[in-house]
Amino acid sequence: MSKIKVGVAGYGVIGQRLADGVALQGDMELVGIADLAPTLSIRALKEKGMPYDLYLVEGADKAKFDALNIPYKGSFEDLVSKVDIMLDSSPGGVGIKNKEIYARLGKKAVFQGGEKNSVADVFFHGYANFEKGIDADYLKLTSCNTTGLIRSVDCLDRAYGIDRVAITIIRRVADPGDYHRGLTNALQMDKAPSHQALDLMTIMPHIDATGILVHTPVTHGHIITVVAHGKQKITKEMALEAFKKHDRIRVVKIDDGFLGNASFFRYARDLGNPRGDMYEIGLWEDSIVESGDNIMYAINIPQESVTIPETMDAIRAACGMQSTRESGTAETNKYLGLGKWK
């Protein structure tokens, strides 16, 4: 079977991680990446020897690339014409314009969470609704918070059945290295319900969800607390058993040194993971508590990298590489090394 050919539009925070994720998949080929300007990410790519071919989107100033001796292979349409599917991680609002090119050239595409749901045929999550993405032309991923949240809720739902959840998101304000949010010393409330709760219900319509979001002046990861009500009584032991079986959930303890979001970032760096990335969410065993008929727990969301596995799942579904969630997610997990810590 020939490898599925993949292109990446936008080589920013998510795009560079998507490119790396595709490059790790033994049954996929990364044809190239596309961007507009010689950003720090593109300059770093050049300094690393240009491991990925670069294509320039419309409006790019070729002279700026030439001045820095950054080689490029051709235009954005040249890239799209060579692939089976595009991963679009362009800035919000650009993906919908790119879709016109994908449609004209007859190419499938997967869009990231920043685009409106209407851009795609399927609002997609690898574990919760893999089968709905099979052979679809246009898929859209959930946001980083929603991706990790659904992993944990879907895990309990498949094991025991969940009918409602209430969440609180303690949200990092910007990615590391971002300055556009300014320097703050305050927390900021969003109006309830949070979009993550609404998105969860879109993916998992059988669950009633609501949530509150609080912006915090930190950069290394979000923390979400979840209160879930099961169709049966779910004990701490039952929840822990299910979570430990999941290859994209890393169960940790505070006493082992996982004190908070920064602990995960430091641990990922100590593991030697590129950019300090973690594909899995962290779940504190110490946070799992029973409250009446509810089960409560807390998870850490590594916002820069958590959506990468589900995007690989999306390629597998859209291109018909696997026909079930079990086989599709298992292949992604194998190539990304998920679950190897167990």
Image (tube, rainbow, N blue to C red):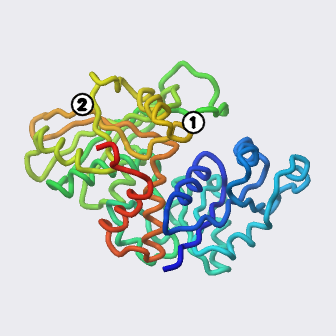
Mark 1 surroundings within 10 Å by alpha-carbon count, few (fewer than 14), some (14 through 19), many (20 or more): some
At x 58%, y 63%, the residue is: 87
Image position of 66 (left or right of 84): right
Tag 2 residue? 287
> Which mark identifies residue 2?
none
Badge 2 amino acid: Ser
Badge 1 amino acid: Asp
At x 45%, y 42%, the residue is: 278
Image position of 281 (left or right of 160): right
Q: Which residue appears farthest toward the top when viewing the image?
A: 185
Q: Are marks 2 and 1 in contact (CB under 8 Å)?
A: no
At x 44%, y 54%, the residue is: 336
Q: Is residue 326 above or below residue 271?
A: below
At x 29%, y 24%, the residue is: 256
Q: Is residue 185 above or below residue 324?
A: above
Q: Is residue 317 above or below residue 246?
A: below
Looking at the picture, how far across and down is residue 190, in whole percent?
A: 45, 36
Please identify the quadrant where the C terminus is shown. Answer: top left
Q: Nearer the viewer, residue 314 or 120?
A: 314
The alpha-carbon separation of the residues under discs 2 and 1 comes to: 25 Å
Mark 2 surroundings within 10 Å by alpha-carbon count, few (fewer than 14), some (14 through 19), many (20 or more): some
Looking at the picture, how far across and down is residue 92, in whole percent?
A: 62, 53
Q: Nearer the viewer, residue 246 or 222?
A: 246
At mark 2, the secondary structure is helix
Looking at the picture, how far across and down is residue 289, in whole percent?
A: 17, 32
At mark 1, the secondary structure is loop
Q: Nearer the viewer, residue 1 or 99?
A: 1
Looking at the picture, how far across and down is residue 103, in whole percent?
A: 63, 77
Tag 1 residue? 175
Q: Nearer the viewer, residue 244 or 29?
A: 29
Image position of 58 (left or right of 66): left
